[in-house]
Image: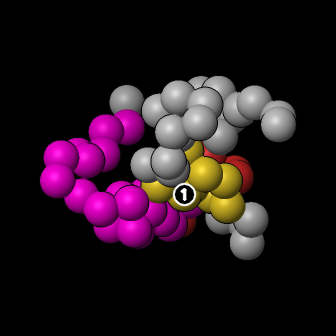
Amino acid sequence: MIAVVAENLTAQELTERFAALHERLAAEGVLPKPVKEVSDVHAAIGDPPLCQINRMLIFPLGILCRAA
């Protein structure tokens, strides 16, 4: 299980926290290595982004994606 505490974090701080976690777990071979592409993460369609994550985390973390 992966948990990132998001209480009182800005979108940029949460993005940075996910990036650091991804780098650490990729170095251990748990997750695929990061690529240069990121995706916005929204609580609901039309909401502002909560953060951005590397696209290599979308499927391993079970994040839902919807095309516009």
Q: Where's residue 20, x and y in %?
A: 41, 67
Local secondary structure at mark 1 = strand
Q: Where's residue 42, x and y in %?
A: 53, 40
> Which of the 4 image quarters holds residue 29?
bottom right
Q: Is residue 14 above or below residue 16?
A: above
According to the image, label 1 marks what residue? 52
68 within the magenta span: no
Start-end of magenta stretch? 2-26
Image quarter hosting the C terminus: top right
> Which of the 4 image quarters holds residue 46?
top right
Image quarter hosting the N terminus: top left
Q: Is residue 25 left or right of residue 63?
A: left
Residue at image coords 51%, 39%: 47
Residue at image coords 73%, 72%: 36
Whether residue 24 is visible here, answered yes or no, is no
Q: Is residue 45 left or right of residue 9?
A: right
Residue at image coords 37%, 38%: 2
Instruction: Say which of 21 and 49 sits in front.
Output: 49
